[in-house]
Image (tube, rainbow, N blue to C red):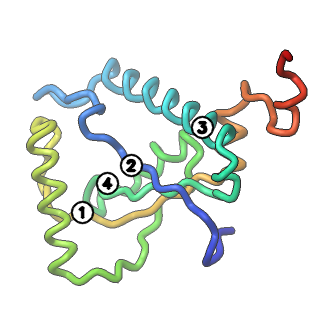
Amino acid sequence: TIAKGNSLLGLHLWNEHIPALTHNGPTIAWAHQIDRAFNLSMRDLARYLAATPGLDDVIAIRADLRLGDAGYNAKLARITARYGFEAPRREHDSAGRLHRFGENILIFMLLLASNPAAIRLPALPREHNIAYLSRAALDRRYAADIIPRAQKGRDRPC
């Protein structure tokens, strides 16, 4: 359970690193490439968190998913659950209607610049959903090859 004041780490998809879709849409090869890259990034994140004592208090990873309209949520829940995230849920957005509209335009323009083949109608109305991956789940899934912090100093050669 996440309480007010807990430390969270925000996850951001870097558009330039997502393979571009062709005009035919996503393929199995494209999905496999995304899957490999995401798993590698999550293992790197787990290693980084384990090696950075200043981040020991991070209890969860927070992903802000503004990838589509309300109809996209069921697909998004299946995809994010595959990587250990809890099902995305719509959170109250304190930003005003005009602010949300501006954010949607910005996201649309970034998509247009980086991967125009991925634009689907309706492109602008995007739901603001948040998914969480607990630190424990991150470590279980992606940090199996990391030496536990308590053993690190003892196993190093002199």
Q: Which residue is mark 4?
A: 72
Residue that badge 2 annotates: 12
**Sequence-wise, which precedes: disc 2 or disc 4?**
2
- Nearest-to-viewer mark from 2 and 4: 2
Judge depth for marks 3 and 4 and give the one in front: 3
Q: Residue at x 86, y 17 (%)?
A: 158
Q: Amino acid at mark 2?
A: His
Q: Amino acid at mark 3?
A: Tyr
Residue that appears at 72% across and 49% down: 136
Tell me the element at label 2.
loop
Q: Quarter-wise, where is residue 112 in the image?
A: top left
Q: Which residue is mark 3?
A: 48
Measuring from the top left, give residue 110's x and y in whole percent.
15, 48
Say which residue appears at 14% left-offset and 69% top-offset.
Answer: 102
Circle 1 residues within 10 Å: few <14, some 14–19, many ≥20: many
Q: Mark 2 or mark 3: name the one nearer the start of the chain.
A: 2
**Which of the two marks, 1 or 2, is nearer to us in this view?**
2
Disc count in the image? 4
Give me the C-alpha separation between circle 3 and circle 1.
32 Å
Q: Quadrant of residue 155?
A: top right
Residue at x 42% of width, y 70% of height = 90
Instruction: Please give left or right for residue 143 compared with residue 33 in the image.
Output: right
